[in-house]
Image (tube, rainbow, N blue to C red):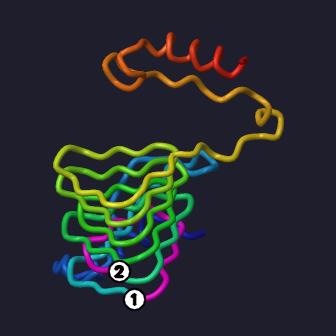
Amino acid sequence: MWKRDESLRSLAESESDDDDIITRRTPVNRKDDDGMRVTERVNIGKSVVIKGELNGSEDLTVEGRVEGKIELRQHVLTIGPNGKIKAQVFAKSVVVLGEVNGNVTASDKVSIKENGSVDGDITAPRVAIAEGAHFRGSVDMQRAEASPSSSSSPPPAVAVKKGQGGGGRSAGAAAQQAASGANR
């Protein structure tokens, strides 16, 4: 029977202390689809350069450079403060502390932290951009594909803060005028 702890211990013992040039697994706290606790995240060191396609089935932190395509559709991709990505990115969740040049697509969330930078389009249901972050591109925040039965439901209401839009009128007054204009 394979014992996970022993294989990780031997992996850790075989790695050098130079974090810049190795790929290392580190503990995280989350559960997989079967409810089993997963305690690993793969790190790519600062001096590592990857050109081509990067696919995986575990969470990944990139401190080095990646050019091409990154695909972690069911996992979290973290671009560390030293990470420089020139790629199309597809992941469940993307956290940007470094630089990304290319489009980012996430099924859950894209978060650009302070000093993080994204030059490209973002597609995700949730997007967070911290003060001090850099972003140039467009954002598409469409929800996950809706079921056929929900396609006939009315569009969601839009909230307008006082003093924005509507030419000084309240959102309700603007909506009433638009509705009455449509009936003429």
Magenta span main SS: strand
Number of the label disc, if any, that sits on residue 66:
2
Query: Which residue: 19% across, 70% down?
Result: 82
Q: Is residue 167 above or below residue 124?
A: above
- Magenta-highlighted residues: 51-66
Please say whether residue 59 is one of the residues in the magenta stretch.
yes
Q: Is residue 102 above or below residue 115?
A: below
Left or right: residue 184 versus residue 101 is right
The kind of residue tagged 2 is Val
> Viewer-proximal residue, 75 or 173?
173
> Mark 1 vs mark 2: which is more N-terminal?
1
Residue identifier under label 1: 51
Left or right: residue 133 versus residue 10 is left
Alpha-carbon distance for marks 1 and 2? 6 Å
Left or right: residue 74 versus residue 8 is right
Q: Quadrant of residue 163?
A: top left
Query: Which residue: 77% across, 33% down?
Result: 150
Q: In which quarter of the image is the C terminus?
A: top right
Please say whether residue 113 is one of the residues in the magenta stretch.
no
Q: Position of residue 64 (x, y in %)?
A: 26, 77
> Viewer-proximal residue, 35 or 2?
35
Q: Position of residue 65 (x, y in %)?
A: 29, 80
Assign a secondary structure to mark 2.
strand
Q: In this view, does 148 lie above or below 9?
A: above
